[in-house]
Amino acid sequence: MNAIDSPVPAEQTSYMFLSEVIAEDRIRKALEQGQFENLEGMGKPLPHDEAAHLPPEIRLAYRMLKTSGYIDDPKALEKEIVRVQDLLEHLEDESERYRQMQKLEVLTMRMERVTGRPVRLDDDYYDRVVHRVRVSEK
């Protein structure tokens, strides 16, 4: 189907991209065939849009960056911090322990950047781990 045969009025196709014309045509055909009836979740509210607070023109970019891992998810960061803390508690290798402490420091800085507030680790726990790490004199 070309733009001339399109069910979209000609005055609209002048400013619509070809992909929009094709999408509109496919949606119209699906509606006519009843493909949008009895869909899963029909009549239920949409899930919360975490980008709703952003201006509409940057929402797509935000979602793409978040999906690609360039924007941190606070819940995922919190899980990773807990995982690294648990790992530190049981590590015997000093160099690996030091590397995980550096990772923990980076994770807490990222969490502080995302949440806008300081992250407080259990001071007693952190002191115990730091005390166990010996710094070599190389």
Image (cartoon, grey):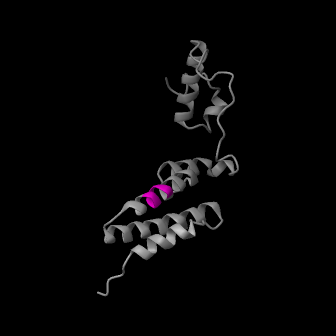
Q: Position of residue 112 (x, y in %)?
A: 59, 65
27 up-or-down from 105: above or below: above
In which quadrant will I find the C terminus? bottom left
Q: Position of residue 110 (x, y in %)?
A: 54, 64
Task: Please tell me how many numbered marks the rendered image carries.
Answer: 0
129 up-or-down from 34: above or below: below
- Residue at image position (45%, 74%) is 130
Left or right: where does residue 90 sit relative to residue 82?
A: left
Left or right: where does residue 105 sit relative to residue 94?
A: right
- Residue at image position (55%, 25%) is 4
Viewer can see residue 6? no
Q: Position of residue 75 (x, y in %)?
A: 56, 51
What main secondary structure does the magenta stretch of the protein show?
A: helix
Q: Nearer the viewer, residue 6 or 113?
A: 113
Viewer can see residue 85? yes
- Residue at image position (44%, 76%) is 131
Furthest residue in direction top, as rendered: 33
Left or right: where does residue 53 sit relative to residue 2?
A: right
Q: Position of residue 1 (x, y in %)?
A: 49, 23
Q: Nearer the viewer, residue 130 or 22?
A: 130
- Residue at image position (69%, 22%) is 43
Furthest residue in direction bottom, as rendered: 137
Tell me if residue 5 is in the magenta stretch.
no
Q: Which residues are magenta?
A: 82-86
Determine the image quadrant of residue 100: bottom left
